[in-house]
Image (cartoon, grey):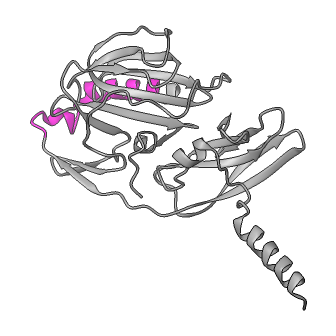
Amino acid sequence: MTAVRILCLLCTLLCAMLAPVAGQAEGLISQSLNHPVPGGVAVLALGRDAVAPRAVYLKNKVLVVRDSDGQWVAVVGIALKTAAGRQVLQLRTGQGARELGFNVAAKKYREQHIALKNKNMVNPDPEQLKRFEREYLAQTHAYGSYRDSAPSNVLLDLPVHGRLSSPFGLRRFFNGEERSPHSGLDFAVPRGTPVKAPADGVITIVDDYFFNGNTVFVDHGQGFITMYCHLSAFNVKLGQHVRRGDVIGYVGSTGRATGPHLHWTISLNNTRVDPAIFAQAFKP
C-alpha cells in the first residue's frame, strides 16, 4: 500500500470520527439545552428544509425552531418518570413521515424533608381537596395547550436573580409523608422582588391556588409554558400579551411555602422539565 493511499485512508477515518451523529444538532440551542435525562431536554436536529417539520412525542406536539447553525431542531421535554433507554420522535416533513430515535441517560434525584405547621397543607380537608382538584384541572388544561406561534426565544432570561434553593426532581416529604416530586426550581429571594417574563407570551392563568398560592402561567408558543408560584401580588391580567422582561408579579410566600421564594416551572410538550437547564445551572 502506497504512502498516498495510507494517507487517504487516515483522512477518511478522521472525517468519519469527526462527523456529527445522526440527529445531533450543533447550534447554540443544542449546546445550551441538550440534556437527555429523565426530567431533561433532548435537542434533535431535523434538517434544513424550507418549511419546519412537524414533530410529535408520546402523542404531544413538540416545539420546533431553527437553531443558530441553520438547522431545524426539536426541543423535546422528557418526563421525570422516563426510564433510561431509547425513545422515538415521530416526524412529518416534506418527504413524508419517519421516526427519529434518541437515547435517554439515567439520572438520580435526591430527597427533601419539609416540616409544615399547617397540617392541611399536607392532608387537605374535603372542601380543600375539591378546590385543589378544580385547580389541578385548570393547570392541566393550560399545560396541554398548543399555539402554533413560535417562541420569541428558547434560551430564557431568568425570572429573578438569586440563590437556587430546592432543585427540580426532589422526592419531597412533608411532615414525613411523601408527595409528588418537585416539578420546578426555587429561587430564594426577598419578598417583593419583581418577577420578569423570560420570553414573550400570553398570560393563560392568573389565580390564587391552594398549594401554589398566587400563580401566573405564560404560554410562549408551541407548547412551551412557564409557571410562577407563591407570588405576593400580580402585575398582569388573563389574556394579556407580555414581552420579554415585563414584570408579571412579585415574590411572596402564598400557598404551601415556608418563606418567601419563587417557584419556577417549565413545561415542553406537556411535560415538566428541569428549569436549571434553562438557567445554565444543570448538574448531571
Magenta segment boundaries in residue numbering: 116-139
In front of the other: 85 or 284: 284
> How many numbered badges does the structure rendering display?
0
Residue found farthest to the bottom: 1
> Which image quarter: residue 162?
top left
Residue beneath the point at 62% across and 29% down: 222
Whether residue 107 is in magenta: the answer is: no
> Which image quarter: residue 86?
bottom right
In front of the other: 110 or 138: 110
Q: Quick check: 187 above or below 80?
A: above
Relative side of 267 to 108, left or right? right
Residue 215 screen position, x and y as percent: 35, 21
The overriding secondary structure of the stretch rendered in magenta is: helix
Relative side of 249 to 140, left or right? left
Task: Point out the image quarter for the C terminus.
Answer: bottom left
Q: Quick check: 248 above or below 138?
A: above
Whether residue 137 is in magenta: the answer is: yes
Relative side of 177 to 79, left or right? left
Residue 266 screen position, x and y as percent: 45, 35
> Which image quarter: residue 164?
top left
